[in-house]
Image: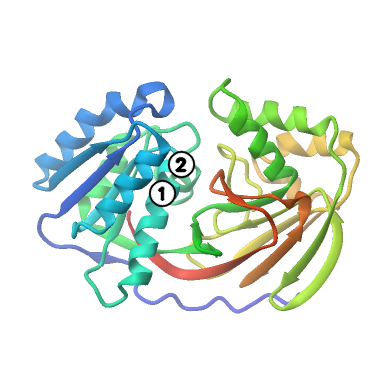
Amino acid sequence: MPEPVVPQQGEPEERRTGTASIALVVNPAAAKGRAQALLPQVTGRLRDAGHAVEISLSRTPMEAAELVARAAGSGVDVLAVMGGDGMAHLGVNAVAGHAAEHPDGPALALGLVPAGTGNDFARSLGLDPADVGGAVAALAGGTTRPVDLLRVGGRWVGTVLATGFDALVNARANRMRRPKGAARYTIAALAELRTFRPLAYELVIDGEPRDLDAMLVAVGNTSTYGGGLRICPAADPYDGWLDLTIIHPVGRAKLLQLLPRMRDGSFASDPCVEQLRARSVAVSGGGGLAYGDGEELGPTPVTATSVPGALRICL
C-alpha cells in the first residue's frame, strides 16, 4: 500500500484567555486511592489559578458515566476527568459527542489528570502520570490542541481498537481483581496463550477487502495500550491516519517471545508483523469481540474511522 499524504490539520493550538469554569469528575478509587489523595492538590492549584472548579466524585462506573455526560451539557468551558483510562474514555466520548452534536455551539475542551494505573491516552499526549503538577498546569494554562479520535459505531476511542488475542486478553484482565496495573495484562496474556489459536478475519481497509488468519489485528490512534505496550509504535494522534498492526499466525512460543518486545515496540520488526496506515478499517471475525481504550465495545463486525481533530484537549 503506498504511503499516504498526511493531511493538514489546521490551527494546532488555541489559547483561552481569562479564567475558566471546570467540571472535574473524579474516580477516587483509581490506583488504590491515589486519585483521592491527590485531589486537594489538584483543586487547590486550579483555584489558585483563578478557575472555578466543580468537583464530582463517582462511586461506580455507571455513576461516572452519568456525571461526565451531565457535566458535558452543563455549559462549562472544560470537562476534566481524573483517574485512569476508563475515566479518559468517558471524557473522550462526552466531549467528542458534545462537539459532534453542537458543531456551532461554544467549544468544550477535555482536561486529563492521569491518576490511574494505565493512563495510556494521557501518556500518548505527553502528560506524565508521575507528574500530576504538569497535568494540572496543562489544564490550568488555557492552551488546547485538536486531537484525532477513532469513531467506532456510536463510540469514540482515543487509543487503540483491539481484536483477536488482544481483546481476549483484555476481557480476561478485566475479570481479574489482582494484580493492578500492567502486570495484570501480562498475567492475563500468559493465561490466554495456553489455548489460543490463530483467528479468521475479514478486513476492509480503505475499501479494499482482505481475508486472512491472524493472531490479532489492532487499529491505533495512539501507540500504546495495556499500560504502555507499544502495539502501534508509529501511531500519531495528530496526523489524521489510523495505524494498523497485524500479527500473522505464529506458534505460542513465538508469540510469547513477542509479548515483552511490545514494551518498546521492537516486536514490529519481526517478519510475522505487518503494519499499514488507513483512514478506515472494517473488522469482522477475530474472535468476535472488540475493545477500545480497554473498554468492551461489543461484538465484531466493527468499523473504525479516523476523525481528525475530533475534540480539543488541554495540553
Looking at the picture, tell me which residue is in the foreground, 258 or 162: 162
Q: Which mark is residue 17?
A: none
Looking at the picture, tell me which residue is in the foreground, 20 or 271: 20
Q: Residue at x 82, y 70 (%)?
A: 210
Looking at the picture, tell me which residue is in the foreground, 295 or 123: 295
- Indicate the quadrant where residue 309 lies: bottom left
Work out whether 108 lies above or below 257: below
Work out whether 137 lies above or below 210: above
Q: Residue at x 53, y 52 (%)?
A: 159
- Indicate the quadrant where residue 225 lies: top right
Q: Position of residue 208 (x, y in %)?
A: 76, 77
> Which colour assignment does the render follow?
rainbow
- Indicate the quadrant where residue 168 lies: top right
Looking at the picture, tell me which residue is in the foreground, 304 or 112: 304
* Residue 126 in sight here: no
Q: Position of residue 110 (x, y in %)?
A: 32, 55
Q: Residue at x 64, y 77 (%)?
A: 4
Describe the element under mark 1 as helix, strand or loop: helix
Q: Position of residue 19 (x, y in %)?
A: 11, 55
Describe the element under mark 2 as helix, strand or loop: helix
Is residue 198 toward the left or the right of residue 281 in the image?
right
Question: Which three-letter amino acid code belongs to the residue tagged 2?
Answer: Gly
* Residue 284 in sight here: yes
Instruction: Mark 2 and mark 1 in contact? Answer it, CB < 8 Å.
Output: yes
Q: Position of residue 142 (x, y in %)?
A: 21, 56
- What is the quadrant of the C terminus in the image? bottom left
Q: Which mark is residue 86?
A: 2
Mark 2–mark 1 Cα distance, whole angstroms, equals 6 Å
Q: Residue at x 35, y 71 (%)?
A: 101
> What residue is pinned by disc 1?
90
Work out whether 274 lies above or below 136: below
